Amino acid sequence: MPLHGEATILKDGRQSETALTIARGTRRLLRACKFATLTEMPLASGRRADIVALAQDSTILIVEIKSSVADFRADIKWPDYRAHCDKLYFAISEHTPPEIMPEDAGLIIADNFGAEILREAPDHRLAAATRRSMLVRFAHTAALRLHGLADPEVSSFGSV
């Protein structure tokens, strides 16, 4: 697997093709906005964020991908993500009605080629200790994944 070019989206078998498409377009938008992103990042709460984005000023976004109305209605965990980010967004496809998404979160519409922010997320700045914890977790997760790309056999020592 090449180390150069666009990073791959971590696939663990839980994501639908629609979710993977939304993730790709959303990550392209975030990259254009100078954010670094990780998918399926484990959080201190035990949850996994669909996308965590980190800006150079240490602003942290979490983007929760919703591939359908049923996917959104089945999800009761998304409010927990607020404790781990400065801004929370939902990312959807054009086939998901935007009006069902909570007004107190940002909204992104995405396809396989890019995305657009339909509604900015409210800012709720993290406490310094939580920010530090998230920054360390982001760096550690990214480093382990990069090492796994360079040496795939090392993946058997533990997953991220």
Image (cartoon, helix red, strand yellow):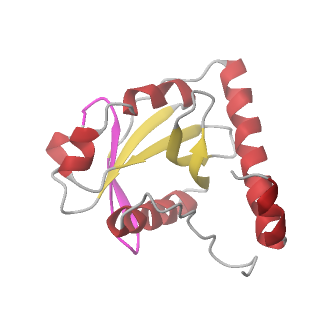
Residue sitting at x 76%, y 52%: 158
Q: Where are the magenta residues, as a range?
A: 102-118
Q: Position of residue 41 (x, y in %)?
A: 60, 46
The image quadrant that residue 89 belongs to is top left
Residue 52 in the figure: left or right of residue 68: right
Which residue of the protein is positioned furthest toward the bottom in this rendering? 2
Which of 56 and 132 lies nearest the eye of the viewer? Answer: 132
Residue sitting at x 38%, y 31%: 77
Residue sitting at x 36%, y 41%: 120
Q: Position of residue 86 (x, y in %)?
A: 53, 31
Q: Is residue 35 visible?
A: no
Q: Is residue 93 visible?
A: yes
Q: Position of residue 21 (x, y in %)?
A: 39, 68
Residue sitting at x 72%, y 19%: 129
Q: Total of numbered circles in the picture?
A: 0
* In magenta stretch: residue 78: no
* In magenta stretch: residue 114: yes
The image quadrant that residue 72 belongs to is top left
Identify whether 11 is placed above or below 130: below
- Say which quadrant the N terminus sits in: bottom right
Identify whether 84 is placed above or below 152: above
Identify whether 118 is placed above or below 137: below
Residue 139 in the figure: left or right of residue 106: right
Q: Position of residue 54 (x, y in %)?
A: 63, 45
